[in-house]
Amino acid sequence: MGEAAGGAPGVGRVLVVIPTYNEADNVADVVARVRRAAPAVDVLVADDNSPDGTGTLAEAMAATDAQVHVLHRPGKQGLGAAYLAGFGWARQHGYDAVVEMDADGSHAPEDLPALLAAARDADVVIGSRWVGGARVVNWPWRRLLLSRCGNLYARMALGMPVSDATGGFRVYRLSALRAMRLESVCSQGYSFQVELSRLAHRAGVRIVEVPITFAERERGASKMSPLIVAEALWRITTWGLRDRRPVRWRRGHDRWP
Ligand SMILES: Nc1nc2c(ncn2[C@@H]2O[C@H](COP(=O)(O)OP(=O)(O)OP(=O)(O)O)[C@@H](O)[C@H]2O)c(=O)[nH]1
Ligand SMILES: [Mg+2]
């Protein structure tokens, strides 16, 4: 297949995986923006049988656009499970790279070309809120604090030179996902992003962080909960004790050897 059917120069065929649960107010807008911002990449909406009809809306877009696909899942099983299913779909359909992106507009599809450009020389590209040049718009101070503290803790506990280990706007080459041995993944909620950061770091693949503009969701309800935060804390602590790696205080990096 040519570039028009899912290609990005130097990366290959790319699939943007957008997990959704009750995103009826957002899904059409985010898919249309991705298609405009990066017309050569394909989109997969991974919907957990949203009661608000998100899956049906996505299906209507897929009916008129051959580059939009929908993965209907039986029920709400968490962000991590939806992404793993999406990655499996990408592998089955011969893609070279996948992009993770939220449906709620927090991740600007307009940043996608910069992430894909960085992926030419990397295995994993993290769209980062906490490197120079990034912007965080309209986030309440409680969320800012949680993200900064969560990232500091993850960096210290896991010895990982990644500034935004919890962020969910990323590019992974399929070859990197294979090296990362995803069969060990156990996260349900947003510790999934930390877990994949850790696996990428341990696999020694090339990680690059690229500044993004992150905005608070404008429509629809957050799925973030105290349980999700508790899972992340618990898992980071467990991994940290298991890895027993020396703490590194470096704030980020361009290349991982
Ligand atoms: N398929 C699927 N998608 C989910 C699930 N939980 C969350 N999502 C999607 O994952 C993305 C991120 O969820 P959000 O609720 O925005 O979580 P968040 O970004 O951590 O929290 P906010 O900052 O409050 O928006 C959105 O596109 C959700 O629709 C789930 O169980 N299944
Ligand atoms: Mg969100």
Image: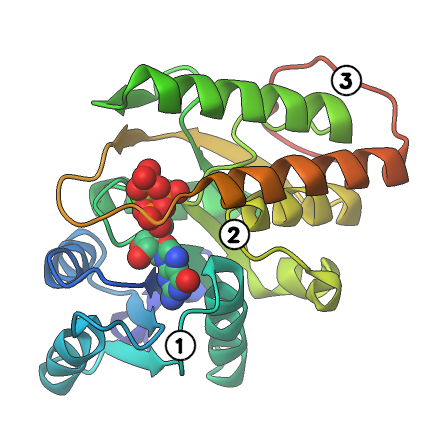
141, 59: nearer the viewer: 141
- The local crowd at label 1, few if under 14, some if 14 to 19, many if 20 or more residues have their Cα within 10 Å, is few
Q: Residue at x 47, y 51 (%)?
A: 171
Which is more N-terminal, label 2 or label 1?
1
Indicate the amino acid at tag 2.
Gly
Q: Mark 3 Cα within 10 Å, few/some/many (few <14, many 20+)?
A: few
Residue 189, numbered label: 2
Q: Is residue 205 visible?
A: no
What residue is shown with label 1? Answer: 75
The residue pinned by badge 3 equals: 248
Marks 2, 3: nearer the viewer: 2
Residue, x 68% and y 47% (percent of image)?
Answer: 200
| Quadrant showing the N terminus | bottom left
Residue 222 percent across, percent down from the top left: 29, 45
Upstream in the sequence, badge 2 or badge 3? Answer: 2
Separation of marks 1 and 3 at Cα, in angstroms: 40 Å
What's the amino acid at mark 3?
Answer: Arg
For marks 1 and 3 on the same chain, the one whose residue lies earlier in the sequence: 1
Report if the beta carbon of the residue with label 2 is closer than 8 angstroms to ligand 1.
yes
The label nearer to you, 1 versus 3, is 1
Q: Position of residue 24 (x, y in %)?
A: 14, 63
Q: Is residue 236 above or below residue 24?
A: above
Q: Nearer the viewer, residue 26 or 202?
A: 26
Tag 1: residue type? Gly
Assign ligand 2 to one image quadrant: top left
Q: Could you say whether the residue bearing mark 3 is in a helix, strand or loop?
A: loop
Residue name at image x 34 percent, y 21 percent: 134
Q: Quadrant of residue 182?
A: bottom right
